[in-house]
Amino acid sequence: MTKCALLHFRALEKYPPTLNLISFLENHQYKAHWKVFTTAPRENMTLYVSSSDKISFHRTNEIYRNQPAISRALIYFRFYIGTLIRLILWRPEVVLYFESISAYPAIIYKRFFNRKARLFVHYHEYIAPHEYREGMKLNNYFHQLEKKIYPDTEWVSHTHPTRLKDFLNDNKEISFPSTRVMPNFPPRNWLLKKEQYQYGDPVRMISVGSLGVDSLYLKEICEFVINTKGKVIIDFYTHTFREEAKAYLENLNSPWIKLKGTVDYHILPEILQGYDIGLILYKGLYQNVVNCAPNKLFEYLVCGLDVWLPKELLGSYQYLTNGVYPQVLKIDYTTLAENGHQLLKRPTELKFEEPQFFMEQVLPDLVNSMYHPEA
């Protein structure tokens, strides 16, 4: 039985693509035992428990904002050193880590304890060189170690072609054996064809994900909803929010705008099917955001929702629709108050087109590469 390790420093429950991978592995027929090294989620999130006895978890505490420095240092130490010791003792043949922040135990294990170990790397986000230098020193240090190990990897992937192109350009002096694009798609069993062609009354909007004021068109969408005087309602589901965003929503005191709190990923389809439009609100302040196709774009679509996409998200333009529903519409949130009302009715000539964005289309490439190395 193949021994495989998955390293993911942040709590899995906040990263749907990683949960999808684990779910996929649970149902995979290859004989493999997976150990997942990660951190525990906050109290308001349900702990993910695998249904398979071939997947086990090792968790440390999660780091949170405003935590004392000594507590943070201990958590880092426990994760990196504890994970490294377990890797050395267990000696997995395959190690997959997510993001630079998770890299250290995998790199040390590969370089000094098991040179035959096969190393796989996936990045949720693209981080530019100046962001590494100006960001957390620990993350930058790990990335410098990564550069030395990249030639010995069997797989390095990003979620979007432009992100991968930028990453390779940043590291053009390095020879990568294999690089891939692995988008973040939801499971096929989420697919829902809505029988109701037109929107409900009122039109129901939903935003799922982190909330902030400066980085999102939060004020613009709320002002639009309030101006419709009850023709539109919006619910925000989030487990991560800036205090100023929470204060802003509470101060609005609007019956048409509600902060719903967190929602477990596995029940998200049940929630989404009760809405008409899924919102993506990024302002596109960073290259990483501009060149992305967010998870929620595909999750909204396969659950039958139309999607409002900020005009700044150039990386998602390939998914804009024409003449079909569910729709993906490019929105200028800065002018929404003036022209947004015309978007509240679907054109009558739209035809249903089943979205084709499922994890089952992309994850086999990764999993088959792990179990069947190329000659």
Image: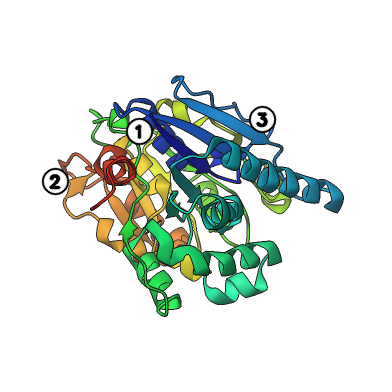
**Looking at the image, is mark 3 or mark 1 earlier in the sequence?**
3
Residue depicted at x 86% and y 50%: 70
Q: Earlier in the sequence, mark 3 or mark 2?
A: 3
Residue plotted at (46% across, 47% down): 96
| Residue hosting label 3 | 44
Q: Is 261 displayed left or right of 368 in the figure?
A: right
Mark positioned earlier in the residue sequence (2 or 1): 1
Location of mark 1 (residue) = 200
Q: Is residue 364 above or below residue 69?
A: above
- Identify the mark at residue 352; answer none if there is no mark: none
> Does residue 135 appear to the left or right of 7 in the view shown?
right
Residue under pointer 2: 349
Q: Is residue 335 visible?
A: no
| Label 3 secondary element | loop
Q: Dot 3, crowdedness within 10 Å: few (<14), some or many (≥20)?
A: few
Give the number of the mark in front: 3 or 1. 3
Quadrant housing residue 303: top left
Front residue of this view, candidates 191 and 30: 30
Give the CA distance from mark 3 to mark 2. Answer: 44 Å
Residue that appears at 49% across and 64% down: 149
Label 3 and label 1: CA atoms lie apart by: 31 Å
What's the amino acid at mark 3? Asn
Instruction: Residue 121: give x, y in percent of width and height.
Output: 44, 54
Query: Which class describes the residues within 10 Å of circle 2: few (<14), some (14-19), or many (20+)?
Result: few
Identify the amino acid type marked 1. Answer: Gly
Q: Is residue 310 visible?
A: yes
Local packing at callout 1 (Cα closer than 10 Å; few below 14, some 14-19, many 20+) is some
Please name whichever residue, 163 or 139, is drawn nearer the observer in this view of the structure.
139
Q: Looking at the image, which residue is at 55% across and 40% down?
A: 14
- In the rendered image, residue 224, in percent from the top left (x then y), is placed at 50, 53
